[in-house]
Each structure stands twice: as C-alpha cells, then as structure tokens.
Image (cartoon, rainbow, N blue to C red):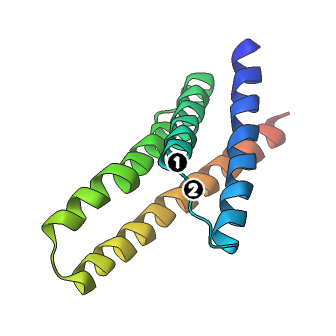
Amino acid sequence: MKLKLVTMIINKLIFIAGIIGFITILFNVRLSVKMETILSIFLIIGSMSEFIETRKFRKLIYPLIIIYFLILLPIIENFIYNRFLYIGVVVLSIISALMILCNEVINTIKEKNTRLNNK
C-alpha cells in the first residue's frame, strides 16, 4: 500500500512538473539544469516504482527512453556534424519512441478491458 502511495505522489509531481515545463516552453523561459535533472530523476523513479508495482518488464522501457533522449542524443550530436542528418536521427527517435509508447497504451487498455470483462 505504501508503494502505491509513493507512486501516486511521484506521478502527481511529474504531472505538475510537465505543466510547469509546458508553461516555460510557452513563455520561452529556460529551465535550469538542476530542475531538468530533478524532473528526469522523478520520471525514472516513477517508472521504476510502477514496474515494481505491476511486475511487468515493459514498464522498464520508460527509463531507457528517458536515458536515450537525455544522455545518448547529445552524445550522438557530437559525432554527427551534419545538422540535417542529426535532425533526421532525432525525428526517427521520436517516431520510434511514440510507436513504443502507443503500443504500451494499447496493451494496457486491452489488459484493463479483459480484467473488467472477467469480473
């Protein structure tokens, strides 16, 4: 029960941070590196606690996607000197991440529907 409470609190903090991030983008304000690091840690902790709660390995994909976008893409940028090619890599990364996340949402909805139908 305590883990569900921690997961709920972390998810609410992530949601609030997402709204703050959207507002900062809307008003063209740059977040500090410390704030981005804290938000990234919240995202990783939230997804890891959700994995522990549900015991489904596909929940571990979220931290990997976060690590890829926050750590590996800047490293890739240092190796690709052509800006157009780098933008292509970023767009393909976003499309593949969205496909993975959409598949996850579809699987979650199917599981919820089967649980409701079995009751």
Q: In the picture provided, is 50 more to the left or to the right than 23?
A: left
* Placement of 28 over or under 34, stated as above or below: below
Query: What crowding class fits label 1: few (fewer than 14 Cα within 10 Å), some (14-19), or many (20 or more)?
Result: some
Residue at left 62%, top 54%? 105
> Please, what is the three-letter code of the amino acid marked with disc 2?
Leu
Residue at left 48%, top 48%? 33
Quarter placement of the N terminus? top right
> Please, what is the three-letter code of the amino acid marked with disc 1?
Glu
Q: Of marks 1 and 2, which one's residue comes earlier in the chain?
A: 2
Looking at the rendered image, the disc whose residue lies closer to the viewer, 1 or 2, is 2
Q: Nearer the viewer, residue 72 or 109?
A: 72
Q: Residue furthest bottom?
A: 84
Residue 64, horizontal then vertical, whole percent:
39, 44
Q: Residue furthest right?
A: 119
Whole-number angstrom distance, CA of label 1 to CA of label 2:
7 Å
Q: Nearer the viewer, residue 109 or 93?
A: 93
Residue 115, horizontal then vertical, whole percent:
76, 38
Q: Dot 1 lies on which element? A: helix
Q: Residue furthest top?
A: 2
Q: Dot 2 lies on which element? A: loop
Residue at left 39%, top 56%? 69
The numbered mark at residue 31 is: 2
* Placement of 14 over or under 54, stated as above or below: below
Residue 92, horizontal then vertical, whole percent:
35, 73
Q: In the picture provided, is 83 more to the left or to the right than 45?
A: left
Residue 30, horizontal then vertical, whole percent:
56, 62
Query: What crowding class fits label 2: few (fewer than 14 Cα within 10 Å), some (14-19), or many (20 or more)?
Result: few
Q: In the picture provided, is 44 more to the left or to the right than 105?
A: left
Quarter placement of the C terminus? top right
Q: Pointer 1 and pointer 2: residues touching (CB < 8 Å)?
A: yes
Q: Nearer the viewer, residue 5 or 107?
A: 5
The numbered mark at residue 36 is: 1
